Image: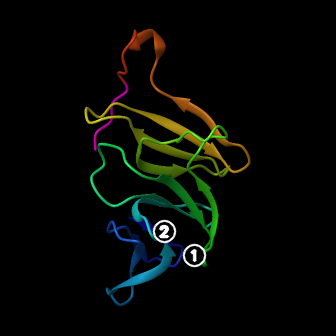
Amino acid sequence: MALLPSGDLLISTAETNLKILSHTTGKITHSKYSVAPLVTGAVCVTGNDKIIVRSRKEGSVFPVTGTRQVVVMDTEGRIEKVYELYDNGKPIFTAPQRITADTENNIYVLDRLNTDKSGRIVALNTTKGVKWIYSGNPDINKGEVTFKHMI
């Protein structure tokens, strides 16, 4: 869920379109924010009114199959940017779970790497894509991934 500037709630129900819960009527309706043919996941509304949503192929999170994206839309539902692949064609994400953004339009994605909840934080910017990746403190990790998150 994410709060729109209007006061309505933007909700992901793992369908192709996000839904809107009206703060005035209490009714849930389909929105213009679509990632078809993929399904929605985590959603974030930024301070500059961009809608950021995780999208992936329908089905279980693991094993990883198909597209895993983070999509940035404007308030009209037009897709402005899709983060999916590095320049070398390899996927950026394994299983993106949570999304947030800062006031400088950087996007932070909690990316789950496997079923034991090991993960990393992927920072994205609008010009270059991946800005940095944090997988945990190397002095603590000592050869295994110890950065874990609660789902």
Disc on res. 103? none
- SS type, badge 1: loop
In the image, is residue 149 part of the stretch drawn in magenta? yes
- At 37% from the left edge and 48% from the top edge, which residue is drawn? 65
Q: Camera-side residue: 61 or 110?
A: 61
Judge whether residue 91 is colored magenta: no
Residue 4, relative to residue 127: is it above or below? below
Quadrant of the drawing holding the N terminus: bottom left
Image coordinates of residue 147 in percent, x first then y, are 37, 26
Report the magenta residues as a range: 147-151
- Between circles 1 and 2, the one closer to the viewer is 2
* 135 lies above or below 57: above
Task: Give, as a three-letter code, the residue at label 2.
Answer: Val
The answer to whether 110 is drawn above or below residue 51 in the figure is above
User: Which quarter of the figure has residue 146?
Assistant: top left
10 Å neighbourhood of mark 2: few (<14), some, or many (≥20)?
Answer: many
Please give the name of the residue rendered at 32% of the width and 87% of the height, measured from the top-left corner.
27
Residue that badge 2 annotates: 35
Q: Amino acid at mark 1?
A: Gly
Residue 22: in sight, yes or no? no
Looking at the rendered structure, the number of numbered marks drawn on it comes to 2
Q: Is residue 105 left or right of residue 66?
A: right
